[in-house]
Image: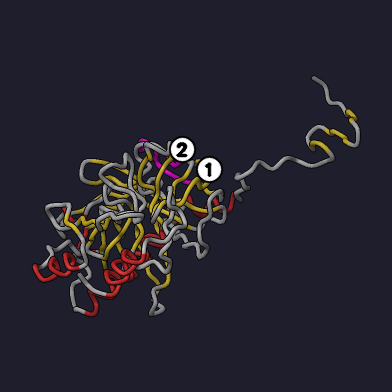
Amino acid sequence: MGSHISTQENEIYIPGLGIGGQEKKVANSDHVKISVLNKVSRSVCKIIAQGGMGSGFFASFVLPDGTLFYGLFTNNHVVNPWSMQLHDNFTVQFNNNIIQFVLQEFSYTVTCPFVDFSVFQLSSNQVESLRQLGIDFLSISRNTPRVGCSLFILQHPNGEELQFAPGSISELWGFNILHKVSTDYGSSGSPITNTSGEVIGLHKSRSVVGKCNVGASIREVIRIIISDRNRKIAMRLSLKEPTRPSYLLDESISILERLKLQQISAHHDDWVSPASFLITPIWFKRTFHGWYWTPINPRKSQDQSNYMSVNNSSLAVIGGYWDGEVPAEKNVRIITYLKDHSI
């Protein structure tokens, strides 16, 4: 069909410009600059480890003492240091470069299967070597993610070449971000970035119930890094050896029972506060880096419950039926106790 100019009442349509000379901006689909895509592409890599593969990315942030932390980020199910020895290695592929990383060469290592992340702190020599290969380091977003915000993921789906997929945040779900970005096997460990190319999350899996994908909030990952490093430094423990879970002492179990919590797992990691009239029970999860809580029964949920850290500044539920609600006073007291005491 040929070009034409048509008129309607109070409207003018000009080909290529739309009604009134304005292009239509699609909701939740902001523009992304090519320069931003180029920068992110220089930070994303493919990882081959332990018989599987995934994605990863390089990023940096400032520690509370002012030190710059440079790290390689991915999922625990992509690289699990708990199942490796310090002399073991894994492979990173960036463009045509193949890099072998040995665990003991990192300055610091931390991993968590519950949040599903692994982070490896790079030495200054490693950072310089990577930069010589053209690798860049992403920045962490300082803004709180919002439902509906546009984002994108650069990834290696099925181990293929780097690919771009846009989308948006569909829901905040505890420490997780539910997003509508197309991913596939091999995409795990990719950075979830806003349209400025700043990291807001770490992609990890598919949500069955929500028909969307899931990533861990990068803020939660960094909170754990800072907490774990500070504890190790204070106790003069090796930063190279990743912290592992420990069993609860009998004294700690007695304290939890006095708080009216009931044990629901053999390893003392899962507890629940009993329900009563007009009071919803709260399920608690213990990890090596602290406690989490949720009003959703993890045994009945077909998907991951919306766990919140007891260290959150707010006691409001994030996501789900109880979104924005605060637990009953008796449960608030338990959450506060677990925040203030090492158990």
Residue 11 appears left or right of 84: right
Q: Quadrant of residue 122?
A: bottom left
Q: Estimate how packed mark 1 is, as few (under 14), some (14 to 19) or many (20 or more) residues with alpha carbons within 10 Å.
A: some
Across and down, in percent, residue 17 comes to 80, 38
**Callout 1–callout 2 Cβ contact below 8 Å:** yes
Question: Measuring 40% from the left and 41% from the top, which residue is drawn there?
Answer: 156
Q: Quadrant of residue 340?
A: bottom left
In this view, the residue farthest toward the front is: 277
Across and down, in percent, residue 41 comes to 48, 50
Residue at the disc numbered 1: 167
Residue at the disc numbered 2: 182
Say the numbered circle drawn on residue 4.
none
Question: Measuring 43% from the left and 66% from the top, which residue is drawn there?
Answer: 314
Quadrant housing the C terminus: bottom left
Amino acid type indicated by mark 1 = Gly
Residue 327 higher or lower than 80, as above or below: below
Work out how far the residue at label 1 is from the one at label 2, CA to CA, in angstroms. Answer: 8 Å
Q: Which of marks 1 and 2 is nearer the N terminus?
A: 1
* SS under mark 2: loop
Highlighted range, magenta: 153-163
Asked if one can make out residue 172 in the rendered structure from this viewpoint, the answer is yes
